Amino acid sequence: MPIMKQLGGLLAWLALSALVAAIGGWGSGNAPMFYRELTMPDWAPPAWLFGPVWTALYTMMAIAAWLIWREYGFQGQAKRALQVNFVQLGLNAIWSWLFFAWYLGAISFVEIILLWGAIVATIVLYWRLNRAAAILLLPYLAWVTFAAFLNFSIWQLNPGVL
């Protein structure tokens, strides 16, 4: 594949990740104030940590998808892997809306479990095609695992709000 096409593909995957981040960010516009008002578990991270972590994760997600696309395009097993990737990106974008914009603690918890499953499926499908791409998603899986426990705990600690 020509280098310019590879570079264009990388930029497209980065742009898609940025779009997903922006959609989620729009839904969590009130997150800093809302986060401060919630009763939090002792182990909850400070609000400032989420931005840098998500920036790194979205970058790794884009690079992982690009590695699959660069090697296989949208053909064969790669097509399915990238379709599952699109599903997990959609689930990722909607979670912020469920939790921060619409205050749906139970639904956001169910949704993050679905997101977790979609990430696992993406990793499994990527592993069969490109192990580096799959490995790039492991921090994302770890963070979403942590976020699911945090989501559940916050929902339980704030029954009148979420």
Image: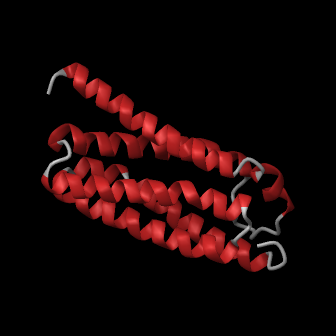
Left or right side of 66 for 148? right
Q: Nearer the viewer, residue 132 or 93?
A: 93
Q: How many marks?
A: 0
Residue at 23% of width from left, 42% of height from top? 69
Q: Quadrant of residue 71?
A: top left
**Which quadrant is home to the C terminus?**
bottom right
Residue at 29% of width from left, 52% of height from top? 82
Residue at 71% of width from left, 45% of height from top? 48
Left or right side of 42 for 60? left
Residue at 19% of width from left, 42% of height from top? 73
Q: Residue furthest top?
A: 4
Q: Is residue 1 above or below residue 144?
A: above
Q: Nearer the viewer, residue 18 or 39?
A: 18
| Rendering coords of residue 150 (x, y %) | 64, 68
Q: Is residue 154 above or below residue 45?
A: below
| Rendering coords of residue 133 (x, y %) | 28, 48
**Which quadrant is home to the N terminus?**
top left
Q: Is residue 99 above or below residue 52?
A: below
Instruction: Give the image's coloring scheme.
Output: secondary structure
Left or right side of 127 for 109? right
Q: Quadrant of residue 155?
A: bottom right
Q: Quadrant of residue 102?
A: bottom right
| Rendering coords of residue 60 (x, y %) | 41, 43
| Rendering coords of residue 103 (x, y %) | 74, 67
